[in-house]
Amino acid sequence: MKTSSDNRRPLPGPAAFAIAVVLGAGVTFALDLALLWWAALIIGVTAAFAFVAVTARIVPPEPRVAAAGTEEKGTTLHNTLVVPTALVLSVVAGLLSAWLLDLQLIEPVAAAVGAVIGSALTFLLFHRLSALLALSFAAVFAAGLIAIAVTALVLVLSGIAPMATFSRMLEYGTRPDSMVQIINDSTTYYLAAVAVAIGFKMKLFNIGVDGQYRLAALLSAAVGGYLILPPPFSQILMIVVAVAVGGAWAGIAGYLKVARGVSEVISTIMLNAIATGITAYLLSTDRLAVQISTNNIGTPPLPESSWVPGIPAGFLGSDREIFGLVFLAVAVGVGYSVMLNRTRFGFELRATGQSQSAAEASGINVKKMVFLSMLFSGMVAGLVGLPQLLGNAHYYALDFPTGIGFIGIAIALLGRNHPVGIVFAALFWSFLTQAANILPFDNIPQEIAVIAQATIVLTVVVVYEVVHRWGRRYQQQQIGKQLGATTVVAEPVGAAPTSGGEGGTGPKTDGERGGEAQ
């Protein structure tokens, strides 16, 4: 029997999308005349979300199923988790967009554009956000709350007001110059995290990223300083050298793994120590270095023709420049995503990481995959020092940044080895690091940021593991319910007995089995 909702005229998806965007932007623009911009935006995006939720029944459904093939829309988990998560994400995205646009546009326009972005996301997230992805966002939110609580507890025990400290960090971290520094730091952190993530996808722990990028940056700077070439050949040569050195150094650990069974954890730790010794040996005035200042030596300064021009950050309200090689990080992220999801190598990489025995049974050369994974991880690691080298320092010296490889491990864990997740993890890590720089001026220990970073890494790993296990059970239960609902179909009441004797117990013909699930 048809319900009243079945008789309604369907609303095409593009039309519902457009109406939601216009509604959200219009309500925000109108309320901005009487309310604060952020309050008007929240109400506008919420109104758009309410429209999307109310019209969901008359919008033709789009194929949106879980990873295991189970339909989610309408389930209890979808209604209690996906719907509120979609609303929160839409509002947050709209607020952040408006806040960034307000640096260049007038407030009403920035709020309206932010409402457009948030309202567009209401439709997309409501109809396409999966339960497991919503669980992942919930895990991040829970881990953040735990980290804030732990950090606040440490501050209270130290006799420091938590809210004042957090407010001070937020204010300093969102200054224009601080945002530029956050983006620059995130560029190098992202490259390091992707290098680590490639190994993680194969269940390999490349701890040697730190040694790989420092050795690659030193040799790349030496080549660029001594071999003067016109642009862009100089920049291309330095990138090629960095990739080759990083890949070769990580390839040693890969070869030891497949040829001698040496754990990559042990070999990369030892290679880090060796790389440190080699850089100290080469960075001498008797070899590759020259005197930079009274207390500093480094490779010959790169000619200006070898620099990579920065991006003016006037749109953020800052006079500083963003590293030009931020586009290199973007290219690496896109390449990493395409490699994982669109290539045979990426499929074999993920399959081998899930189960080496199953991969071998399917014909995958596991040893080859292990070696290539370490090789590619090292090649990306070789790029880590280039944004700083070509965008700011212009030589490799004793004060060149170190420890980025270990930060990359934490960021890869936070981002769950996902190319987009790593972006947000890198920005968050950079924000905490930059925001903590103001604390010493207020006589607050700067290590508060380290406590927050360490706590959130630990809690994210634990919470994600719990979510992952619960998600697998949820998928299995959903598949079981669907299979149970389709295995048996009852015969109609009053159906004629089947042939095969008086009791009707004989075998059924194919035609008589037509109503049953095969």
Image (cartoon, helix red, strand yellow):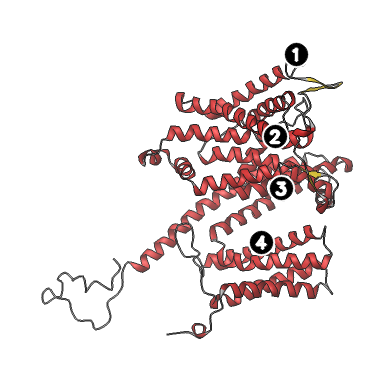
Q: Secondary structure at mark 3?
A: helix
**Between disc 1 and disc 4, whose residue precedes?**
4
Q: Please determine whether, in this image, residue 338 is positioned above or below residue 209.
A: below
CA gap, disc 2 and disc 4: 40 Å
**Residue 454 visible somewhere in the drawing:** yes
Give the residue number, with chain letter if any, for mark 2. Answer: 235
User: From the viewer's perspective, is the residue at label 1 or at label 3 nearer?
Assistant: 1
Give the quarter of the figure containing the C terminus.
bottom left
Inter-mark Cα distance, 1 to 2: 26 Å
- Rendering coords of residue 211 (x, y %): 64, 27
Identify residue type, mark 2: Gln
Question: What separation in Å lies between label 2 and label 3 (alpha carbons)?
Answer: 30 Å
Task: Give the image quarter of residue 86.
Answer: bottom right
Question: Which of pointers 2 and 4 lies earlier in the amino acid sequence?
Answer: 4
Q: How far from the left and from the top, in percent, is residue 73? A: 51, 68
Compared with 314, 288 (above or below) is above
Q: Which residue is mark 3?
A: 428
* Residue 272 relative to residue 179: left or right: left
Mark linked to residue 89: 4
- Identity of the residue drawn at 63% across and 38% down: 409
Q: Residues within 10 Å of mark 1 (few under 14, many from 20)?
A: few
Q: Which mark is residue 286?
A: 1
Say few, some or many: other residues with alpha carbon within 10 Å of mark 4 (under 14 / 14 to 19 / 20 or more). some
Callout 1–callout 3 Cβ contact below 8 Å: no
Please name the amino acid that badge 3 sits on.
Answer: Phe
Residue 359 horizontal/vertical position (percent): 40, 40
